Image: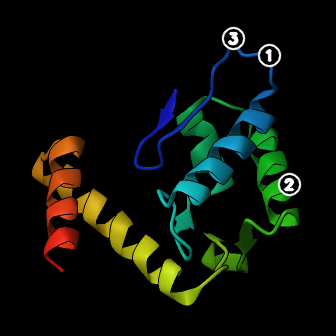
């Protein structure tokens, strides 16, 4: 199962528990920049429904992610990826996530989008 927009997937046949898979998937998405600092995550209920998981399973993963400093709950405002690391790197992660989203909306394949970025970096 894949959570639209987040690229999170749970494999029902995997040996790791679903909450562990969700935890690892969010950490990987943050590390790769797919989830940029400041990104808002779905509510526990919405993500549970989308992934076909129990609400308590997603809540357990969110609690572990918050304990690890990967995400932070902001009360009624929601849950967000924490701001961390170098400010320049954070800005680039946000720009990269925006670019990836734009490329996807325009129907541009990932390899073509990477070529455009490479050409822009080489020209810079």
In the image, residue 92 above or below residue 29: below
Pick whichever of labels 3 and 2 is earlier in the sequence: 3
Residues under numbered marks 3 and 2 in contact, where contact means CB atoms less than 8 Å apart? no
Residue 104 lies left or right of residue 17; in this view the side is: left
In the image, residue 25 above or below residue 85: above
For the residue pair 44 and 63, the one nearer the viewer reads as: 63
Displayed quadrant of residue 43: bottom right
- The CA distance from mark 3 to mark 1 is 7 Å
Res 13 label? 3
Pick whichever of labels 2 and 1 is earlier in the sequence: 1
- The CA distance from mark 3 to mark 2 is 22 Å
For the residue pair 118 and 47, the one nearer the viewer reads as: 118
Displayed quadrant of residue 94: bottom left
Which residue sits furthest bottom? 87
For the residue pair 31 and 35, the one nearer the viewer reads as: 31
Residue 118 in the image, given as x and y percentages of width and height: 21, 61
* Residue placed under numbered mark 1 in the picture: 15
Residue at x 11%, y 53% (from the top left corner): 106
In the image, residue 14 above or below residue 108: above
Res 64 label? 2
Which element is circle 3 on?
A: loop
Q: Residues within 10 Å of mark 1 (few under 14, many from 20)?
A: few
- The CA distance from mark 2 to mark 1 is 19 Å
Residue 14 in the image, given as x and y percentages of width and height: 72, 16
């Amino acid at each position: 199962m894949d959570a639209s927009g987040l690229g999170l997937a749970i494999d029902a046949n995997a040996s790791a528990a679903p909450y562990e898979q969700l935890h690892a998937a969010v950490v990987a998405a943050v590390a790769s920049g797919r989830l940029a600092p400041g990104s808002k995550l779905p509510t526990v209920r919405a993500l549970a429904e989308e992934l076909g998981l129990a609400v308590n399973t997603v809540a357990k993963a969110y609690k572990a992610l918050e304990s690890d400093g990967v995400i932070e709950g902001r009360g009624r405002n929601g849950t967000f990826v924490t701001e961390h690391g170098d400010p320049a790197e954070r800005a680039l992660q946000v720009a990269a996530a925006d670019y990836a989203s734009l490329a996807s909306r325009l129907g541009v394949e990932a390899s073509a989008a990477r070529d455009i970025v490479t050409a822009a970096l080489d020209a810079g």
